[in-house]
Amino acid sequence: MSAELKGASTLPEAIDLSHHLSVVARNRVVSPLKNLAKYFGRPGMISLAGGLPSPAYFPFDSVKADILNYDSYTPKPATESQGPLSWILSLFSGNDSSSTIPITVPKYPEHPDDVNLASALQYGLAKGIPQLQQIIAEFTATIFRPGYSNHTIQLHVGNTDGWAKIVSTLCNPGEGILVSEWTYPSALETTNPLGISPVPVSMDGQGMNSAALREVLSGWDEAARGMPRPHVMYIVPVGQNPTGATMGAQRKQEIYDICVEFDVIIVEDDPYYFLQEGPYVHPTQRYSNVKQTDMSDDQYIASLVPSFLKFDYQGRVVRLDTFSKTIAPGSRTGWFTCNPIFAERFERHAETSTQGPSGFSQVLITKTLISWQATGYLQWLKGLGVEYTRRRNYFIDGLLDKFHLELASTPQTLFPGSVRYIASDRSGYFNEKGSRKPLFSFVPPSSGMFVWLQFHFEDHPKFKELGEETLEMQLWIKLAEGGLLIGPGNMFAANKSASSASYPGHFRISFSNAEDNDLTKAIDIFAKVVKKFHEDARIVLE
Amino acid sequence: MSAELKGASTLPEAIDLSHHLSVVARNRVVSPLKNLAKYFGRPGMISLAGGLPSPAYFPFDSVKADILNYDSYTPKPATESQGPLSWILSLFSGNDSSSTIPITVPKYPEHPDDVNLASALQYGLAKGIPQLQQIIAEFTATIFRPGYSNHTIQLHVGNTDGWAKIVSTLCNPGEGILVSEWTYPSALETTNPLGISPVPVSMDGQGMNSAALREVLSGWDEAARGMPRPHVMYIVPVGQNPTGATMGAQRKQEIYDICVEFDVIIVEDDPYYFLQEGPYVHPTQRYSNVKQTDMSDDQYIASLVPSFLKFDYQGRVVRLDTFSKTIAPGSRTGWFTCNPIFAERFERHAETSTQGPSGFSQVLITKTLISWQATGYLQWLKGLGVEYTRRRNYFIDGLLDKFHLELASTPQTLFPGSVRYIASDRSGYFNEKGSRKPLFSFVPPSSGMFVWLQFHFEDHPKFKELGEETLEMQLWIKLAEGGLLIGPGNMFAANKSASSASYPGHFRISFSNAEDNDLTKAIDIFAKVVKKFHEDARIVLE
């Protein structure tokens, strides 16, 4: 997988973004030993300088794993066959242990450049082992095609850690960060205690709205807001958490241009990038059988929405990638892609906090990717996309089975421009205008793990009595008591008070983890509880 | 390994140390979902709340390792035999691959409580997997015997990360932290950029001097110092970095009592705890062959200097332990032991930064410790102690071979109360009083990885011309050009200007990592360069 950066050149020196560095980041020193680095790599040099244990005392002689084949989730023609013997064939195919590949990482390698435990389990560079660095650098260049050539990779221990390092490096107490009005709560749990406040921007079906962003920035009144105009944006552009919204190329270009105009750094937290599922198609119209796994590598890469990196000619994008959704969350391994100045500061920060990711994680991921090769890893990612598409469809098909779903006839204010389904009770009441009373509505996500439901509590019999916020929590508790846990919308509001006031009654449902039979049970519970929630109230009132 | 806490009771409620929490730590929220936790563990509950990938898509079917036997570094009578066939026997013993033990961690376990990848590679608790939590809790109670029963364990990703979390949790910008006058530079690289300054306390042969500590605290002048009296101490009490000093029980009691008096939290960073080597004995007097590996578990535990935890009846000690020196640095796994209030804050911090240690690290360490069992791990630790003792002796014996070493006749001001060796050139000049001119001196460490050399540049021919600081750097460069890297003393000074002014000319030498032949070469280079450094200057001057 060679880096393809035709036309990309190094960042112009005239563009200097170092004024974005926080006071803390400016004060981080380079270790004095680094100034003496010219002596370090000399052949034959004996070092008694570091406080290193002897690798002889690492109790691991080797670490091994049985890994799945990269095509484990590529649908096989054999298993799709409907012939009379297909059930027998299926017994001998698919994801059984015989289809795994053994990998081994020895303590002492045959060749000094081979992945090995003596190096990876020793104190090492915060930027990670060189083999993993190289694989990630080539992968990033090939897939995300950053707009300049000297973009830099720096490992971190997961995007949550990456975001914490970015906040420390770019933000001072008393500042604000631009976020989508509904956003990942953990991102704010990182910033809030530091005295860094969210500045919510309205969303639509593609996530953050560019006109709303411009309005926030152009009309910024420092005195009224009590803080300077934000210079950092946090955004989850694909399969957004919690709304599931995915931002297309044009919107990204618009937002990038606004960030150039107002000198904003874009932090692109993109864990769901490879869970791009395409639009949800009603089962009766699901004609095409073309899957991501049928595509060539080039077709697949071209089918993915572009990263903000692709538009970045000024080095103002810090992209966060993670192996959490493509390998495993417990790997605690991910990486920054950004300009070299920020990357160097992230490395200094890592040296005095996390250091590099676990050596076990690094060698096992590296060896897996070496075993699969680049095209094998792409095949694995394609397979994941197909699998999550299947799960997304399974869940929404299940809703379709339990509720009357119809397409919204007019664009909704919340998510204009997107296909929105309105769900009502099949046997339910009609309202005064003769149309069905909507229970909830949602935009089927084209990426990620989440369906974001908006309840139409205004038609709930107790709406005026209780208010939407109380109804949201009451429904959540009824669902939990019925045996189903989902995410209450309020916890994702960037501005708890304002968002609650404008439109409470949201829930985030994740279709990524539960198996089909549990999803079926969950939809049953959901349908029963939601219908009863409205009916009970009606009965009480009548 | 059962917890032995006879007589220890829970912390009295009257002792509330929460006023030590930083502004940031107070502002860290508990995730809203935690308030709904009563619904989470219910049997049969289906959760679509979390953004979790399916474990089916973790490509690791199993992770395995070949681990060394716990007695790999226990000296075997067979290999020590000097009989005619001993060389043949030695071919079949020792640390070869046939003596390893295979361990396996499956994705899906046979029993739900077994260590497994489906849980450990999923998003998990920041406090780590329950099996590792339990092992560490029992180990901590057994070895360190904290003075109260409700001490709490919380995992971190290495002591560097642990210290960073402590600083964020306990310190506000503008405060000072008490440190030894020579200290681990990375600890200050964490605090300095945050506007938290080191307050150095003088040391002696046992590390931080208690009288000096009292003087600093009792005489604190907030106005003159420009900051409030420090309420946090950072200390490496065993095999101190860089001086190698180890603090005994009485000194620890004195320091603890002073910290009670002045309401100081003690952060005990103790990575070298299990590298306790005992006093260095001149080879001609090395009669005893009793090694740590000959001791019973109880004898071994009793032979170790007590942790500050043992004196802690108020919950004011935060202890940092790590697997970096006992398993491998690349494991990036360690733990806090402290009062429950601080532990809860560390957990909240981890949830918005590192999360728990790598799942691969956790399962491989856990499975190793389960395989070895508690007494096996103690045997492993005893073996490490013996190994590092051998390395310490090998290095100092080497110095003895190259220099004239004699015991200081009077206690030195720097390290009173310790055995100090003064090294001079065997064929060197005598000074005016007829005694040999000292080149350098050192206290042989009784723990850890480091020998701390103090050069006596006052006898150097160019002392008056160049000054000690320049001589230190010139000697460092001569050594590097000769092929040997060691740690320049100045980088370990808590207060660069003051310490340089009082006694520069220190070097830290680590004997922990290099193999014997490299140590021999290193001592050769060291002896030649040091002698030449003095002679060349003399020739030029004469």
Image (cartoon, coloured by chain):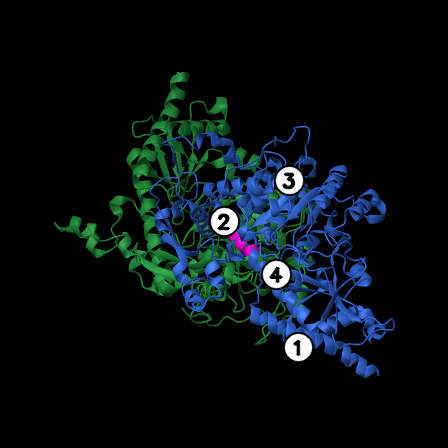
Chain colours: A green, B blue
Q: Quadrant of residue B324?
A: bottom right
Using the image, name the chain to which the residue with label 4 belongs: A
Q: Nearer the viewer, residue A96 or A525?
A: A96
User: Distance between the Cα atoms at labels 1 and 2?
Assistant: 42 Å
Does label 2 or label 3 sit earlier along the sequence?
3
Check disc 2 and give the amino acid type. Tyr
Classify the position of the C terminus of chain B by image quarter.
bottom right
Give SS at disc 2.
Answer: helix
Left or right of A383: which side holds B393? right
Check disc 1 and give the amino acid type. Glu
The magenta stretch is B377-385
Q: Is residue B21 magenta?
A: no
Check disc 4 and give the amino acid type. Gly
Disc marking residue B377: 2
Have a look at marks 2 and 3 and say if they share a chain. yes
User: Distance between the Cα atoms at labels 2 and 3?
Assistant: 21 Å
User: Distance between the Cα atoms at labels 4 and 2?
Assistant: 23 Å
- Whole-percent x, y for residue A286 in the image: 26, 48
Tell me, yes or no, whether the two marked residues, 4 and 2, touch with CB atoms within 8 Å.
no
Identify the residue at horizontal 82%, vertical 76% (top origin). B461
Name the residue carrying label 4.
A51
Q: Residues within 10 Å of mark 1 (few under 14, many from 20)?
A: some
